[in-house]
Image (cartoon, rainbow, N blue to C red):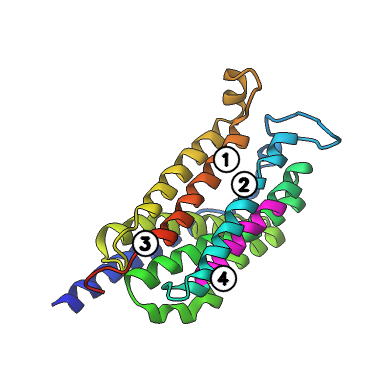
Amino acid sequence: MSNIKLTHKIFVMLLMFLGMFIFIFIRPPIPQDIKYHQFADEVLFLGIPHFFDVLSNFIFLVVGWLGITEALKRENLVARRSWIVFFVSIFLIGPGSAYYHWNPNNETLVWDRLPMGAGFMVLYLILLIEHVSEKLEKYLIPFLLTGIASVVIWAIWDDLRFYFWVQFSSFLCIPLILLTFESKYQTKSGYYFCLLFYFIAKLTETFDHQISAVTSDLITGHTLKHLLAGLGLWFLVKMIRVRHPAINS
């Protein structure tokens, strides 16, 4: 009976993944809006343009490094290789995003999105490994390449549909996995905090200029996005540091 329930849950998840794919790809190609590069942070300090948007990416270096070292220490960590690759992706967001914000344009944006696309898919795989089957870790390379390919396709054809599918379908399926599948660990609260802070970070990104105006340019929405996203990712580091296997695993 449990296998039937598991198969049913997997079917629903795959249906959602496929549904998102159809929903996005029935639309015409989505080019990158050039206005996206017009951020509120116009501070020039120490010769660095968009100083706070650039500097705030330091949090990804810190969280990525902490995650890598923590995963390396936990030899019995489920999905250990995938966790290491995930936190390497987070670490690489630091220089990639800093490079982009130094000179925002489509060409530099590629280096911001490459580790992000990889990170989205690897985190999705980690959830599947922990909640469905550890055998799925053998698909780490295909998942990683799918995330990277989504950015490469946008960079070549200026079509964001595949990138949007990778980003948003994985983040829609992640709550479904967390709520309906049993984990191999006692706690998974770090995932919920990560999703919460990611959602808030996306809101602050959307209201970049408005937040800058409200705070009298003390902080912009996009700078705040980096800090909130980094904080959300830190909860994942904390989670794998303290979690223990579930009693029934």
Q: Position of residue 142 (x, y in %)?
A: 54, 76
Of discs 4 and 1, which sits in the foreground?
A: 1
The quadrant of the rendering that contains the C terminus is bottom left
**Residue neighbourhood size for the residue with mark 2, other residues' Cα within 10 Å, grouped as few (<14), some (14–19), many (≥20):** many
Q: Is residue 202 above or below residue 149?
A: above
Of discs 3 and 2, which sits in the foreground?
A: 3
Q: Magenta segment, which residues?
A: 82-96
Q: Position of residue 229 (x, y in %)?
A: 53, 45
The amino acid at mark 1 is: Leu
Q: Secondary structure at mark 4?
A: helix
Q: For the point 50% across and 50% down, which residue is it?
A: 234
The amino acid at mark 4 is: Leu
- Nearer to us in this view, 194 or 151: 194
Residue underneath mark 3? 243
Residue furthest left as drawn: 1
Of discs 4 and 2, which sits in the foreground?
A: 2
Distance between the alpha carbons at the discs numbered 3 and 2: 23 Å
> Do tag 1 and tag 3 residues touch (Cβ < 8 Å)?
no
Distance between the alpha carbons at the discs numbered 4 and 2: 23 Å
> Do tag 3 and tag 4 residues touch (Cβ < 8 Å)?
no
Q: For the point 52% across and 60% down, which residue is it?
A: 120
Distance between the alpha carbons at the discs numbered 1 and 3: 24 Å
> Do tag 2 and tag 1 residues touch (Cβ < 8 Å)?
yes
Residue underneath mark 4? 144
Residue 161 marker = none
Residue 20 seen in the figure: no
Mark closer to the chain start, 4 or 2: 2
Residue underneath mark 1? 227
Distance between the alpha carbons at the discs numbered 4 and 1: 25 Å
The amino acid at mark 3 is: Arg
Residue underneath mark 2? 59
